[in-house]
Amino acid sequence: MANYDDDAKLTRDKLNSLSPSMCMAKWLQVSLHLPQGRTHSCYHPPSHPIPLAELKKDPNALHNTVFKLEERKQMKCGDRPEGCQYCWNVEDAPDAPKGGRLSDRHYRSSEWWVKDAWDEVVNNPWDHNITPRYVEVNFNQACNLKCSYCSPHLSTAWEDDVKKHGGFRFSNGTGHNDIDYLRKTGLMPLEVARKDNPYIEAFWKWFPMIYRDLKVFRMTGGEPLMDNNTFKVFDYVNENPNPFLDLSITSNMSPPSPKLMDKFIDKIKALEEIRVWEDPKRFNPDSGNHWYVAPACKHFSLYVSVDGVGKQAEYMRDGLDFDTLYKNCRRVLSETDGTEISFINTFQLLSIPNLRGFLQMILDLREEFGYENQEDKIIQPPDHHGFKHPPFVRKKRQRVWFDIPYLRYPD
């Protein structure tokens, strides 16, 4: 943790030398909500619409909207974009330590995927159409679960339920999961997105344009295994290897059809196959040896959304079959070589009573599939143009993780 904070402090000083409101996430990170046609850079600012008129001119508008360009202009001029109030609140809190408080703009700007693009951000004007290095995309709201914290705009199961029974009404006059409210605020999927979604059409024009420079690409939902675009991404990466790419999805690991899980595991296996290819521009330029011997991407990660174990987990995530989830997680760990699983717990009141059982599940999986019970795997790559390459060694690694909120303990 000390290194994480130290990196953020160094980055804070670098950012402040450019502007007191500068944040690299505004240029280099993007979350795309394609059913709603919305985008934002960093999770804290509210998402904003992607105008179709901008998109028709240039698919880069998925990330480089006029609205976002104006926010970048503000940052380069030292002004504070209104949508970034989360960080301004942290930094303006009283009794700040020497040098100022660290906010998420300092942490995000110190991420590993920022480093090679720092100069591009600094040396270009605010209206430069930049390629993001970290992309998160939601292709579809389709989902077979109704998780307690979720909403109709992210789950078709929730949408069907609320259309049938209505949203929640509380005794204090407030409500929850009201579709009319979600529609007024722009969070429900657009009607145009339910047919031939122009935002997905633009994505598939844009993705090949940014692919070479991508460092992180993560697919969320809904449930991404219920959308064909997820598998189309897997196929694209398999056919266009990128050894610098961290690829991942977030899944409930209990899709409605077992065939979807079979298909998913087959796609992971295909990505993990060692292959040989050449790239004179990116690997050993001017050396005459441009061969990669590697899988299709640097790494594949699976983020599993679950908040407990057994019946308790099923209560929090209506529609979940916990035994199916657990079996599918074990399948991924057993049938693939390098895939890591990170369990995501939303850490709500309902998850606390059996947190010990949840952690025990992770420890049990670590004991079986963890670092100590693995061995380096030696793989002989295929011959390439008549040349035989030395073996590829897949190093053993910790494969089971718990993704928790950032906790700071007293010194």
Image (cartoon, grey):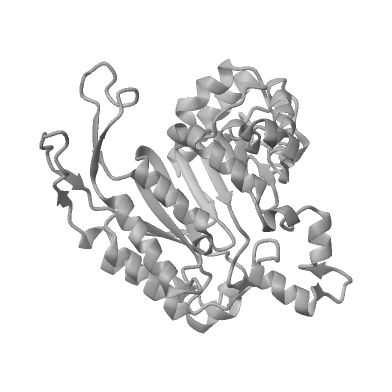
Residue closer to the observer: 392 or 264: 264
Q: In this view of the protein, which residue sits in the foreground, 160 or 8?
A: 160
User: Quick check: 301 left or right of 205?
Assistant: left
Q: Quadrant of residue 161?
A: bottom right
Identify the residue at image location x=33%, y=69%: 331
Q: Residue at x 56, y 33 (%)?
A: 28
Above or below, comparing residue 390 to residue 149 in the picture: above
Residue 201: give x, y in percent of width and height: 60, 45
State whether residue 378 is above or below residue 143. above
Is residue 169 left or right of 305 when viewed as pictured?
right
Looking at the image, which residue is at 34% across and 65% down?
A: 332
Indicate the position of residue 241 as horizontal and vertical percent values: 34, 40
Identify the image quadrant of residue 112: top left
Q: Quadrant of the N terminus?
A: top left
Residue 164, image x, y percentages: 76, 78
Q: Quadrant of residue 123?
A: top right
Single out the residue that lies furthest toward the front.
196
Q: Position of residue 350 (x, y in %)?
A: 61, 75
Residue 43 visible in the current orientation: no
**Which residue appears at 64% of the width and 17% of the height?**
125
Report if residue 209 is visible in the image: yes
